Image (cartoon, rainbow, N blue to C red):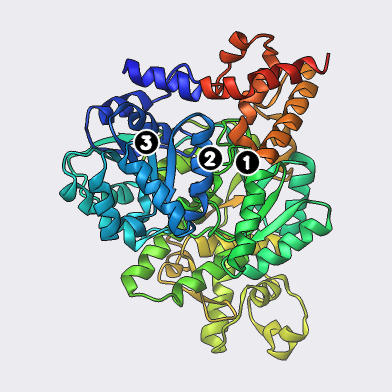
């Protein structure tokens, strides 16, 4: 391990390993197979990069995203690691050079897409060189029922058969116990040592807000809490992505769209801008983000309900990879539940597939509707325990739980009478109008004012009734069908109508969590006031340096490293070498410039 620690210090500029890193690195260096479940930002990459530097040969990394290989390799080259990739973006001559370097033993790391590794020509190439290890990144892509399934990952189970003496390490930031078991089974890693780190991301503040005007709510979040910060906004549809990006730009926010409907050149340009520019917001479908190494994403916002807790956790995990305080914000409303339920009903696949989708949605709804700590609920989903964090919205502004049994009975009764007395089906809006006793044209036309339930719900407001419908749908006490989201009773409805089941509901706190959230910001976000102008000066220098090299700014130095430099203000190269993230290569390359930038403000 002395070689590993030396490489960690010399190459990456860190004094010690974190958490399970040391045990994983030692195990893989010794030739053992490993399955690693570690949250985004937990340092998974070092778990295969360090063994690749210490073991003889080249570490072969299977990465699912061709578009990001260049940045991953650039980051390694910046710290003096000999790295390359092979993918379809290269011409023949470029690929030939990388192949020759591999065969000659001149590469520490080689990145490949799973599709390329499945080609016999690539396997023959690997036979001609020395492979130190196989790292299977984003290993959850092997899960056939997962949200990122990649068929070519299934072929990776053959690695051990062809290269039985080469250790394998499979890594992911997103895995329930079922997905974990699927990774082990499908990749033939039954004998591998299992490393499961805590999924807790204490620097991320989880908040779920009632959906009112989501684009305006998002704008308010950015302007008040994250002005000038980099962020990712997720929307369900391409149309919503386009409109949200246009809305932000029209309101002075630097934003670009990203979805599969854009041509590949536009997508590549927008992704490159996000990686290379400070303070850019990307509005995207879930197609964006996996493998993104940008460490200073300060917020991730969802304007639509994610389909699963795994998807939500992975997407929000792209915030705050540098460990500094960040926000995960979700706008959630009745229409989200209706839409998701309807999508499941009309999805392709058999009943078992739809049941799985429903189970994923139920878990996501439980997270949204909980009156307990969001973080504890998240950890429980992944089979881990935790204590209330004091830093999510339900901890900062605890919601009340109230007995909604009578309200539920009134609403279910209205649905029952429409369906069984009139043979009619309506959506939530009409049912709520009936309960509130509204004499709308639609109510008059259908003579719904003659129903016995007309006007019996005036103790609640329209928005409160929408919350009741949402929570009944979430609890499976109501169902929806068709394009218009008409409401139907379920088998469980009878228990409530028959007074055999109590219905507890969540009441939103009157005051928004934002003020409390801002007050509760973690001190890690703060620097001494005198260090702030120094930090901005260093950021300006970094921006120019990255621009000249054509690489993302974080490849030069991360925000966390610049913050430490600004705070400690080293005056010699030896002092600068003591800053976390300043390895030998970066010290030699940037040391004098950093010291000159620090001195330039005096």
Q: Give the vertical position of 122 relative to 339 (above or below).
A: above
The residue to which callout 2 is attached is 74
The N terminus sits in image quarter:
top left
Disc 1 vs disc 2: Cβ atoms closer than 8 Å? yes
Mark nearest the camera among 1 and 3 is 3
Counting residues from the start of the chain, the first of labels 1 and 3 encountered is 3
Give the SS element for disc 1: loop
Counting residues from the start of the chain, the first of labels 3 and 2 encountered is 2
Q: Give the vertical position of 309 relative to 598 (above or below).
A: below
Residue 537 falls in which quadrant of the image?
top right
The residue to which callout 3 is attached is 106
Q: CA distance from mark 1 to mark 3?
A: 25 Å
Q: Residues within 10 Å of mark 2 (few under 14, many from 20)?
A: many
The C terminus sits in image quarter:
top right
Check residue 476 in the rendering and tell me which mark sits there, or answer none: none
Q: Position of residue 334 (x, y in %)?
A: 61, 64
The residue to which callout 1 is attached is 552
Q: Residues within 10 Å of mark 1 (few under 14, many from 20)?
A: many
Do we see residue 519 in this rendering? yes
Q: Which is more toward the observer, 397 or 477?
A: 397
Q: Position of residue 233 (x, y in %)?
A: 64, 53
Q: Is residue 523 left or right of residue 64?
A: right
């Amino acid at each position: 391990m002395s070689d590993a620690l030396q490489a960690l210090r010399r190459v990456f500029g860190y004094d010690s390993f974190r958490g399970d890193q040391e045990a994983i690195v030692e195990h893989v260096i010794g030739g053992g197979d490993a399955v690693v479940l570690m949250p985004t930002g937990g340092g998974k990459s070092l778990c295969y990069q360090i063994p690749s530097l210490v073991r003889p040969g080249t570490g072969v990394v299977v990465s699912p995203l061709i578009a990001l290989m260049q940045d991953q390799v650039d980051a390694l080259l910046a710290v003096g690691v000999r790295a390359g990739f092979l993918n379809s973006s290269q011409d023949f001559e470029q690929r030939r050079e990388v192949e020759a370097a591999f065969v000659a033993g001149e590469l520490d790391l080689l990145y490949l897409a799973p599709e390329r590794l499945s080609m016999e020509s690539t396997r023959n190439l690997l036979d001609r060189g020395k492979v130190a290890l196989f790292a299977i990144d984003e290993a959850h892509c092997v899960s056939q029922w997962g949200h990122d399934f990649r068929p070519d990952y299934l072929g990776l189970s053959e690695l051990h058969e062809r290269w039985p003496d080469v250790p394998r390490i499979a890594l992911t930031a997103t895995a329930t116990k079922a997905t974990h078991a699927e990774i082990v089974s499908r990749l033939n890693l039954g004998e591998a040592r299992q490393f499961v780190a805590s999924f807790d991301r204490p620097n991320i503040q989880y908040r779920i807000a009632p959906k009112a005007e989501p684009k305006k709510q998002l704008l308010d979040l950015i302007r008040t809490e994250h002005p000038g910060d980099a962020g990712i906004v997720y929307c369900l549809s391409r149309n919503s992505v386009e409109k949200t990006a246009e809305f932000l730009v029209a309101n002075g926010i630097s934003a670009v769209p990203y979805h599969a409907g854009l041509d590949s050149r536009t997508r590549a340009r927008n992704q490159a801008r996000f990686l290379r520019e400070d303070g850019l917001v990307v509005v995207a479908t879930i197609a964006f983000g996996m493998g993104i190494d940008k460490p200073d994403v300060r917020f991730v916002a969802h304007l639509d309900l994610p389909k699963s807790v795994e998807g939500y956790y992975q997407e929000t995990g792209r915030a705050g990879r540098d460990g500094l305080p960040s926000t995960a914000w979700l706008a959630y409303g009745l229409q989200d539940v209706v839409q998701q339920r309807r999508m499941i009903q009309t999805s392709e696949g058999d009943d078992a597939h739809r049941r799985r989708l429903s189970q994923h949605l139920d878990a996501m709804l439980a997270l949204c509707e909980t009156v307990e700590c969001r973080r504890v609920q998240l950890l429980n989903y992944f089979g881990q325990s935790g204590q209330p964090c004091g830093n999510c919205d339900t901890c900062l502004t605890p919601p009340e739980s109230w007995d909604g049994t009578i309200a539920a009975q009134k609403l279910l009764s209205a649905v029952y009478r429409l369906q069984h007395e009139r043979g009619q089906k309506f959506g939530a809006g009409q049912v709520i109008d009936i309960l509130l006793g509204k004499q709308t044209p639609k109510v008059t036309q259908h003579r719904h004012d003659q129903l016995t339930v007309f006007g019996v719900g005036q103790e609640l407001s329209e928005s409160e009734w929408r919350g009741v419908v949402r929570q009944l749908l979430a609890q499976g006490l109501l169902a929806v069908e068709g394009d218009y989201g008409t409401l139907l009773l379920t088998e469980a409805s009878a228990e409530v109508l028959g007074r055999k089941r109590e219905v507890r509901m969540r009441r939103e706190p009157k005051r928004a969590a934002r003020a409390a959230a801002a007050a509760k910001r973690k001190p890690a976000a703060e620097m001494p006031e005198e260090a702030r102008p120094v930090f901005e000066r260093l950021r300006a220098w970094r921006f120019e340096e990255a621009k000249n090299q054509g690489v993302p700014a974080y490849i030069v130095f991360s925000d966390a490293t610049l913050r430490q430099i600004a705070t400690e203000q080293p005056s010699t190269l030896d002092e600068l070498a003591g800053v976390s993230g300043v390895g030998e290569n970066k010290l030699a390359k940037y040391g004098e410039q950093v010291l000159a930038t620090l001195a330039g403000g005096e």
